[in-house]
Amino acid sequence: MVNPWKTYVKLSAVLMGPHDLTKGSLAFLNYPVQLMFKSTKVLLVMVMGAFIPGLRRKYPAHEYVSAILLVLGLILFTLADAQTSPSFSVIGVIMVIGALVMDSFLGNLQEVIFNMNPETTQMEMLFCSTVVGLPLLIPPMVLTGEVFEAWNSCSEARLREAASLEKHVLLKKLRDTLESLKGHVAGRNKDDVEEAIAMVNVLCFAVLSLNYDLQ
């Protein structure tokens, strides 16, 4: 590993933080307002890139003007397209602004890491930031109960899959039995057996389709 773990702790914080804050802000803001704030990300990325040590990007004045016009256009488009009126909440605004600030650090911080250590691979950055970020996601998931909902959902899915598989196996055995019986009957009885086999095939298809829909 090229970079120290503390580097990936910082990266994981700005990687996981915006995700949690953005999702949480929807409890206080409606979607058009959140989208309106997120439209300013390009401008924040430019500003942060000019102040982050190790990067210190300098943009021409016309690029800042272009970014401002782009942001204004996106905001106006979002408000014009919104079906509901904007709903503002101080807590939601603080959360989405915090998410934007942290998100604007993300790309710039990744570029700084690559510039400082050119031997850094994308695989290392992705793996380490995810491994470090996992403990940061578990506490809020436990507090909100999402981790238990996810576990229950997985358990129910496994039970449904097992029940569906058991039904499919039983129908297959029944079909095999009818197939073997068909060779020992004749006339009308043979027609009845063939009809029963066709019904079992339909049931097998219905079970598979129901299992697919549940997934």
Image (tube, rainbow, N blue to C red):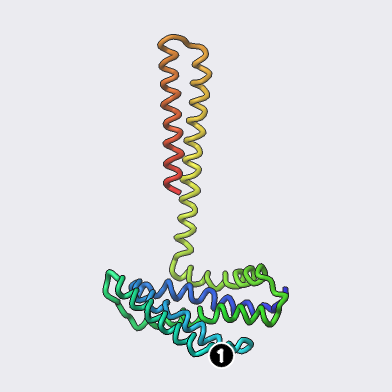
At 66% from the left edge and 67% from the top edge, which residue is drawn?
Answer: 123
The amino acid pointed to by label 1 is Phe
Q: Residue 17: x percent and y percent?
A: 50, 76
Instruction: Indicate the quadrant where residue 120 lies.
Output: bottom right
Residue found at x 45% / y 60%: 149
- Point out residue 125 in the picture as x, y percentages from the top left corner: 64, 72
Vertical order, 215 against 40 (above or below)? above
Q: Residues within 10 Å of mark 1 (few under 14, many from 20)?
A: few
- Residue 141 in the image, given as x and y percentages of width and height: 48, 68
Q: How many marks?
A: 1
Q: In which quadrant of the rendered image does the N terminus lie?
A: bottom right
Q: Residue at the front extreme? A: 62
198 left or right of 113 in image: left
> In this rendering, would 71 be left or right of 4?
left
Q: Nearer the viewer, residue 123 or 19?
A: 123
Q: Is residue 192 above or below residue 116?
A: above
- The residue nearer to you, when weighing 144 against 88, is 88
Q: Which residue is mark 1?
A: 51
- Residue at 38 percent across and 74 percent down: it is 35
Q: Residue at x 49, y 21 (%)?
A: 178
* SS for dot 1: helix
Which residue is nearer to you in this view: 70 or 121?
Answer: 70
Task: Using the rendered view, name the quadrant where residue 201 is placed.
Answer: top left
Residue 146: image location, x then y, percent: 45, 64
Determine the residue located farthest toward the top in the rendered image: 187
